[in-house]
Image (spheres, grey):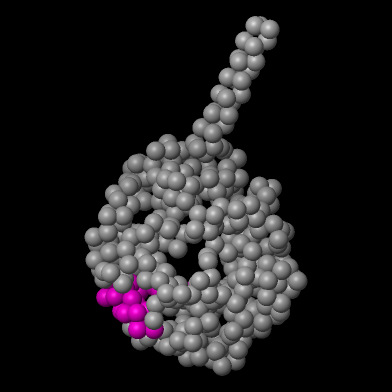
């Protein structure tokens, strides 16, 4: 067992928020077509409030901290916040579009010892990336920033979110990342807006392209192993949880609101009304979330994919029930293995039942005419 695995195991057993995601603003200098955030800045936490939130996280056992937005560098106090978090010995990752990272900013990030800078890059082609961000020249500025950070010895990773706008570009973006000498991650999930608007999920890639991604070695490693169905489910899996959200992971919005995860908009409390410790240990919402084991999931616990599904309880929550399936993850499991999920099979059964009923009604009407 690796040190990280041991840390996660102990944190799970003790209920420690080992990791936290903190958005310091939702304002952004880009307007990405698939973005799930509103870009309102009114009511954001002050510098003092953000520092106090980080202090509280640290005191509760948080070690891994992701600072993001929006675009975090739009806040003039961004580097002050990063410095404060590093002063508490937190392992800090910065998530950014990087268009504001010039030579001075790159050197400062190196000086602070930021663990990693994660940058969104949507295409190897400038015109496609800029069409997605709606910021002319953003591709060039992002690439220049990645080079600056790399030259300063900062660990960089490019994240390529897949959608209809950049269909088929993933391999080329990965090659570009290799040329730059930085990491690469591909993300096929389009997240619904936090205000409940699902329209942007229509930007998701086709099943055919998703299948190509899941069956390409350079993206998933051993394709045969990755796509092989797992037979049999043991008690350890059924007694486990779908993911770390609300167990060892917390999300804090720019407005001091606490949630299980940035993709899980179930309100748990506000740091303007309670301490993080009170919310983490005594929130009714978090208590309910933690009481649910995989065996309690009304559809997924009986699914053939339960042992390896990437089911996101946050996406399930936005579909109406965090104890239920996430349709996007059901689709991924089906594309990986060719085996329909339990939820997919039930839906197909309902459609077949309705079709059969309509046929019977049509027959009755025909006989009566």
Per the rendered image, the range of residues in magenta is 47-68
Residue under the point 49% across and 42% down: 305
Q: Is residue 133 left or right of residue 113?
A: right
Residue 348 found in image quarter? top right
Q: Nearer the viewer, residue 3 or 67?
A: 67
Above/below status of 269 relative to 347: below
Residue extending farthest top: 368
- Residue 267 appears in view: yes
Residue under the point 60% across and 53% down: 199
Q: Position of residue 143 (x, y in %)?
A: 66, 79
Above/below status of 109 relative to 298: below
Above/below status of 109 relative to 201: below
Q: Position of residue 7 (x, y in %)?
A: 33, 66
- Residue 222 appears in view: no
Residue 269 found in image quarter? bottom left
Q: Position of residue 116 (x, y in %)?
A: 50, 77
Q: Quadrant of the C terminus?
A: top right
Q: Position of residue 165 (x, y in %)?
A: 71, 61
Q: Nearer the viewer, residue 206 or 294?
A: 206
Above/below status of 248 relative to 232: below
Residue 103 found in image quarter? bottom right
On whether residue 237 falls in the magenta region, the answer is no
């Amino acid at each position: 067992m690796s040190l990280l695995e041991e840390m996660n195991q102990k944190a799970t057993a003790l209920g420690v928020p080992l990791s936290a995601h903190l958005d310091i603003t939702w304002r952004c200098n880009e307007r990405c077509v698939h973005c799930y955030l509103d870009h309102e800045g009114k009511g954001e936490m002050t510098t003092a409030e953000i520092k106090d939130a980080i202090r509280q996280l640290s005191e509760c056992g948080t070690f891994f901290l992701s600072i993001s937005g929006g675009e975090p560098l739009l806040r003039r106090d961004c580097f002050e916040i990063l410095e404060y978090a590093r002063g508490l010995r937190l392992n800090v990752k910065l998530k950014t579009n990087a268009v504001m990272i010039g030579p001075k900013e790159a050197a400062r990030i190196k000086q602070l010892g930021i663990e990693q800078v994660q940058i969104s890059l949507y295409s190897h082609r400038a015109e496609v990336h800029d069409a997605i961000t709606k910021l002319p020249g953003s591709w060039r500025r992002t690439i220049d920033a990645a080079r600056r950070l790399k030259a300063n010895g900062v660990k960089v990773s490019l994240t390529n979110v897949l959608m209809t706008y950049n269909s088929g570009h993933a391999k080329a973006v990965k090659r570009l990342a290799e040329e730059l000498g930085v990491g690469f991650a591909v993300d096929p999930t389009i997240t619904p807006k936090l205000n409940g608007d699902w329209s942007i999920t229509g930007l998701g890639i086709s099943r055919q392209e998703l299948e190509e991604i899941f069956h390409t070695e350079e993206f998933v490693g051993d394709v045969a192993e990755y796509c092989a169905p797992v037979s049999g489910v043991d008690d350890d899996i059924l007694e486990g949880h779908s993911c770390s959200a609300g167990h060892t992971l917390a999300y804090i919005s720019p407005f001091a609101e606490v949630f299980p995860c940035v993709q899980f908009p179930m309100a748990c409390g506000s740091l303007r009304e309670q301490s993080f410790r009170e919310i983490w240990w005594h929130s009714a919402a978090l208590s309910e979330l933690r009481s649910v084991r995989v065996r309690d999931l009304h559809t997924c616990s009986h699914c053939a994919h339960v042992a390896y599904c990437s089911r996101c309880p946050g996406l399930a929550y936005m579909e109406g029930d965090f104890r239920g399936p996430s349709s996007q993850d059901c689709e991924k499991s089906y594309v990986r293995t060719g085996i329909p999920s339990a939820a997919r099979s039930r839906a197909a059964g309902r459609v077949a039942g309705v079709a059969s009923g309509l046929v019977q009604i049509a027959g009755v009407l025909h006989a009566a005419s």
